[in-house]
Amino acid sequence: MAQLVATLASTHHPFYLKATTLPPEQQMPQAAEWKRKVEAYRETLARTKPDILVMIGSDHFHQIFLDNCPQFLIGKAPRYDAIFYNEEREFGIPKYVLEGDEAMSGFMHQHLMDQDFDFAFSNELKIDHSIICPIITVRPQNDLPVVPIYTNIFAPPLASPRRFYNLGRAIRKAIDAYPSDKRIAAIGTGHLSLELGGPRQFMETGPDPEFDHRAIEWLRNGDIDAILDNVDHASMAKSGNATHGFLNFILMLGVAGPEGADYVDNLDLFHTMEAYFTWYPKESAA
Amino acid sequence: MSKYYVNKFLFTVDRNPDYLRRYTEDARTFVATWEQSIGPRLNDAEMSSVHSFTEAEREALINHDYVALFEMGAHFFLNLTIFIGIYDEVFMAKSGPLAFQKEFALRLQDWRDKDYPSVAT
């Protein structure tokens, strides 16, 4: 069977590439520290020598729109173009092409369906920065095939925090059951407290630093009970109108299982708290 | 009211450099064209007759009035991204990085401690 070798959950900051590649005199003061932290985080993936990346992100109205809006979707294609015109324009992220793994996508889709997660799917999925940001940060050589999974964190009504956690558990079971000798890493991105297009956007800190610190401790300790006791859609909205990206962290904790993280780091940046977690599996989820 | 149709406007224009340029240069003319020829498009062959703007929605789009659009429940991400596309460079040249984003937030300060208008459609 395939082996899950690492679970990574992090924020995705679309300005990382631009912020760390500008001429030094134009860089923000935290750019060097940010780069150092990201490169250290990158090693937590590299040392596990993965063969395939299962990547969890959320389309930001790039391919998916309100005329046809799935809660959960899996890509099943031989490769994936990535980055839309408006992301190049706003963030300075170039185009990418990612190799797919149709066999694993197909297995994952069927296994999730068999576990009562009725996924939508796409045979022609163009990926956006929610999945390219972690390629830039943790696998910039872009040399591995991916199985992309999208969640809806944007267009209400959203699935519950418990459903996101249980989906993570189901993804873990599918990885563990995949009949292959491949080494799999699961990588997901989301947000801590975040405001976009509202009165609390682009402040010196994220909109709710207290939530950010609590969330980091919950994830550090693998404390899913505390998360489910404290986090619901209304509480996330109070922490910032785009805080629902935290649901993807909950999903990733489901992939890892309710265990303490093996690597935790964070960085307080303008308007957001960046956070980086890695779990190495202790036992299978089956 | 059609939050969906306002979002469809923001979505279709933000992703298309030609539409974005026309909306930036002459919003009133472009919004009229969008309502006639772009908004009703379901796909390359089919048209939809379902949605239309209210007068208030039309005026908010013509005036690049992101405060009014926020208050109508336009999706926060679409409402921010398109106007960053239009105003970011102009504000940056005058007042430095993130100047437009900070101005956007400042103009919404009355909402800071209230429940925001729902973006559900």
Image: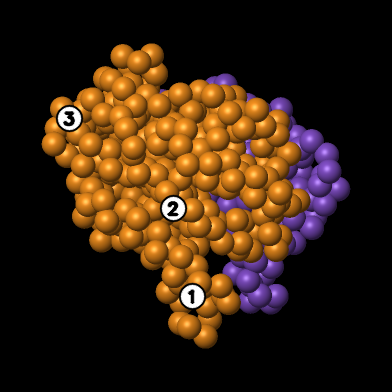
Question: Contact, CB < 8 Å: mark 1 with mark 2?
Answer: no
Whether residue B71 sits left or right of residue A195 in the image: it is: right
Chain of the residue displaying label 1: A
Location of residue B33 by image quarter: top right
Residue at 44%, 70% (x, y): give it: A36
In the image as oriented, which residue stretches furthest toward the left? A181
- The chain in orange: A
Whether residue A103 sits left or right of residue B15 in the image: it is: left
Kindly identify the amino acid type of the residue bearing the numbered disc 2.
Tyr
Front-lying residue, A191 or B75: A191
Residue at 42%, 74% (x, y): give it: A21
Residue behind mark 1: A32
Front-lying residue, A57 or A30: A30
Residue behind mark 3: A1
- State the separation of the CA atoms marked 2 and 3: 26 Å
Kindly identify the amino acid type of the residue bearing the numbered disc 1.
Ala
Whether residue A223 sits left or right of residue B103 in the image: it is: left
Kindly identify the amino acid type of the residue bearing the numbered disc 3.
Met
Chain B color in figure: purple
> Which type of secondary structure does the marked residue at label 1 adopt?
helix
Chain of the residue displaying label 2: A
Residue behind mark 2: A263
Q: Of marks 2 and 3, which one's residue comes earlier in the chain? A: 3
Colouring used for the render: by chain
Numbered tag placed on residue B47 in the rendering:
none
The N terminus of chain B appears in which quarter of the rendering? Answer: top right
The C terminus of chain B appears in which quarter of the rendering? Answer: top right
Callout 3 and callout 1 share a chain = yes
- Circle 3 or circle 1, nearest the eye: 3
Chain of the residue displaying label 3: A
